[in-house]
Amino acid sequence: MTKQPGRVPAAESDQPAVDAASPGGRPVFAPGAAVLALLALGWLAAMLWSTREAITSAAAGITAISLSAFALPGVISAALVAGAATALAGGNLLTRRYGDGATLRFVGAIGAGMVVGLIAALAINLTYFDTSTTNVIAGTTAAAAIIGGAIAGARTAPAVGAVVTAALGALVFVVAFSRARDPLFDLFGAGDSQQSLVDAAKWVSRTESLIAGLLAGLLAFGYLTWARRRALRRDPQTPALRWPAYLLAGAGPGLLLLLAEVIIRIGGRSLLDLASALSEADAVAQTSLGTSRVDNGIWMLFVGALTALIAFGRTLGPAHTDDDPAVVDDSGTTPPAAENETNAGTGTGEGEDEDEADTTGHEAVDVDPARADPAR
């Protein structure tokens, strides 16, 4: 029985028949999820504590409403990341015990986010002053934690872990960057005029977003690389994640910031309106800060995604094509796989006689015997 040229039987194909989305049918974990959850919860507690200190400070000279509006974005971003990180750690536990069920993982992720949101809301109500702004902060924080938990219910756990890691690193950097704002204002030409201050503030904000996006992209790529190595140690047949996973992981922190802005403008709308109604200067400040947060999220989204994608591209090797020469082993013979590919490219295969193989490479010509012999 002969084979058709250019075809390889299914039994002889060396390509894995397993989809990369569910490698080997085994569950995929997010490494270090417990540590991420502890760090994210610690960051949320620090944001809640700093907000409480700012609101209860009598030396600030600003009303509690205005200070609450200024502190709300940091608390909401921290609650999003904390809910996602805690749900990711809970998802790993559920997967180890009950298997990789999409429905169970999603329900468990929402439950973990609800637990984080409930604890944060109780902490706010018990430690903050009993005002209308306190209830707004508590409710919006709880909603952000639940939404973060729902995000962690995605099936690709390593990509979610990369987003959480990059977002947490970016949030810490933004707070640390505040110490460098004053020197950068002077560097970008901030003077006594109002226009020079506005222009300098724009450049400082763009510099912060650019560096935060670069950091987020590198952290996302580093986490996925680490997760890939751990997965290979557990199962050498685990397929690698494709480029969309790296693109999403790099863009994840920017997407979380934009999502936090949506939560703020919906859940904290009453607080923002109260702060804007205090004075014309407060209204301008709230509008300017909202626009700046949206710009920062967009910058981090594109810069982080591009950074992670470029870093992933540098790890790829050259693509092999059908025009590549056959590989010859140490014995000087061509391997059977390469020989079969060569035969398939020339139109010959096993079981074909030599006459057919000879005529595949040359054009067939009908020769007249009278013309072939000049003596005739």
Image: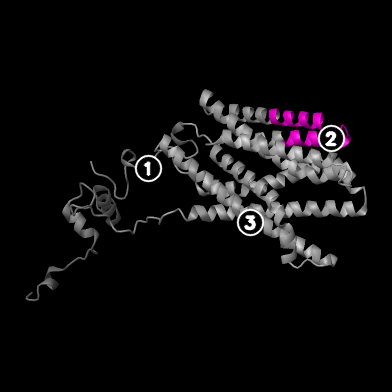
Return the residue at label 3. 211
149 left or right, relative to 323: right
Task: Decide which of 348, 203 is in the foreground and name it.
Answer: 203
Along the line of sight, the residue nearer the viewer: 131 or 17: 131
Looking at the picture, does residue 39 appear above or below residue 360? above
> Where are the magenta residues, as a range?
115-144
Q: Report the side of 166 relative to 13 (left or right).
A: right
Of the 4 image quadrants, the one containing the N terminus is: top left
Q: Nearer the viewer, mark 3 or mark 1?
A: 3
- SS of the residue under disc 3: helix
Magenta stretch holds residue 29? no
- Determine whether label 3 and label 2 are within 8 Å by CB: no
Q: Residues within 10 Å of mark 3 (few under 14, many from 20)?
A: some
Residue at 64% x, 36% y: name it.
84
The residue that mark 1 highlights is 15
Residue 191 place in picture, x, y as percent: 81, 67
State which tag comes first along the sequence, 2 or 1: 1
Determine which quarter of the picture holds residue 156. top right
Task: Please give the name of the residue rendered at 44% of the width and 53% of the height, measured from the top-left corner.
Answer: 316
Above or below residue 352? Residue 76 is: above
Label pair 3/1, CB-CB below 8 angstroms: no
Checking the image for residue 134, the label placed there is 2
Colour scheme of the picture? one colour
Instruction: Check disc 2 and give the amino acid type.
Output: Thr
**Which numbered disc, 3 or 2, marks the residue that appears first in the sequence?**
2
